[in-house]
Image: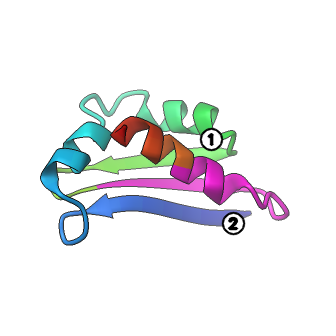
């Protein structure tokens, strides 16, 4: 398995962008990311300063990082 991370942080992304990408309700956020990105496991860390999506994908799944980034981009609009 590979562990992947994509995210937005206050030092690099403006507040308006982080607000659009944020997960207001943490319950079910990991499942949402797992299903949308098609990865084995997912975890979401969403605070006032950052939004991070962590995922585990099997070795050889070269598109997993791109799909995970796509989920973040989709939320951020």
How far across and how far down the image is residue 62, in percent?
78, 61
Q: Is residue 70 magenta?
A: no
- Rendered view: 21 above or below 9: above
Where is mark 2, residue-wise?
2
Residue 56 visible? The answer is no
Q: Is residue 62 magenta?
A: yes
Where is mark 1, residue-wise?
37
Identify the disc placed on residue 73: none
Q: Residue at x 26, y 38 (%)?
A: 20
For mark 2, does the 10 Å Cα neighbourhood hold few (<14), some (14 to 19), or many (20 or more) residues? few
How far across and how far down the image is residue 64, in percent?
69, 54
Q: Residue furthest right?
A: 60
- Rendered view: 22 above or below 32: below
Color scheme of the displayed model: rainbow
How far across and how far down the image is residue 26, in percent?
32, 34
- Magenta span covers which residues? 51-69
- Rendered view: 66 above or below 19: below
Dot 1 falls on a residue whose secondary structure is helix
Place residue 21 in its image quadrant.
Answer: top left
Using residue 24 as the reference point, say whether residue 45 is left or right of it. right
- Of the image marks 2 and 1, the number of the one nearer the N terminus: 2
How far across and how far down the image is residue 23, in percent?
30, 36
Q: Residue at x 43, y 27 (%)?
A: 28
Dot 2 falls on a residue whose secondary structure is strand
3D distance between C-alphas at marks 2 and 1: 14 Å
Residue 37 visible? The answer is yes
Using residue 50 as the reference point, say whether residue 33 is left or right of it. right
Q: Residue furthest front?
A: 77
Instruction: State if disc 1 and disc 2 touch (CB < 8 Å).
Output: no
Q: Residue at x 42, y 33 (%)?
A: 29
């Amino acid at each position: 398995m590979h562990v992947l991370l994509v995210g937005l942080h206050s030092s690099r992304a403006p507040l308006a962008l982080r607000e659009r990408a944020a997960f207001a309700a943490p319950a079910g956020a990991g499942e949402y990311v797992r299903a949308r990105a098609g990865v084995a496991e997912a975890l979401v860390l969403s605070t006032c300063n950052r939004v991070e999506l962590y995922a585990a994908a099997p070795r050889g799944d070269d598109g997993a990082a791109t799909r995970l980034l796509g989920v973040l981009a989709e939320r951020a609009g």
